[in-house]
Image (tube, rainbow, N blue to C red):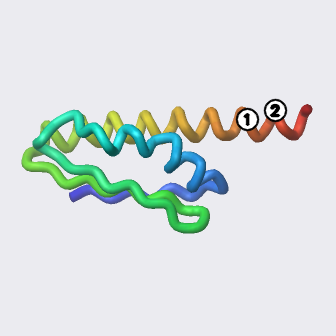
Amino acid sequence: MAESVFETDGADVIFLSLKPELETPVTDRSSIMLEPCGSQLTLKIVSDDLVSMRSTLNTWLRLIQVAHEVYNCSMDARQDG
């Protein structure tokens, strides 16, 4: 199992933006749990093998990073506008 905790003010927003991805698993070889709690977003991945773990972890880290960047851009735009 791999577990990552991300500290961000946008944890709830990022979770909601990624929720549809949780409903359609890419593979049966791993399972994903994503959970917001206050200003933290916790990602847990359980996998049958190392290759699937690496692939799933890379995919979800990238998805969270992009969602976080979009959240930050939208917050910056609100402050500027």
Q: Is residue 74 above or below residue 46?
A: above
Amino acid carrying label 1: it is: Ser
Residue 61 at x, y percent in the picture: 40, 40
Q: Quadrant of residue 49?
A: top left
Q: Secondary structure at mark 2?
A: helix
Amino acid carrying label 2: it is: Ala
Residue 72 at x, y percent in the picture: 69, 39
Residue 3 at x, y percent in the picture: 33, 59
Residue at x 37% of width, y 38% of height: 21
Q: Quadrant of residue 22?
A: top left
Categorize mark 2 by other alpha carbons within 10 Å: few (<14), some (14-19), many (20+).
few
In the image, which disc is placed on residue 42?
none
Residue topped by disc 1: 74
Q: Is residue 47 left or right of residue 17?
A: left
In the image, which disc is placed on residue 77?
2
Name the residue furthest bottom: 38
Q: Secondary structure at mark 1?
A: helix
CB-based contact (under 8 Å), mark 1 and mark 2: yes
Residue at x 33% of width, y 34% of height: 59
Along the line of sight, which residue is nearer the eye, 43 or 13?
13
Q: Is residue 36 left or right of residue 60?
A: right
Residue 38 at x, y percent in the picture: 59, 67
Q: Is residue 51 left or right of residue 61?
A: left
Q: Quadrant of residue 53?
A: top left
Categorize mark 1 by other alpha carbons within 10 Å: few (<14), some (14-19), many (20+).
few
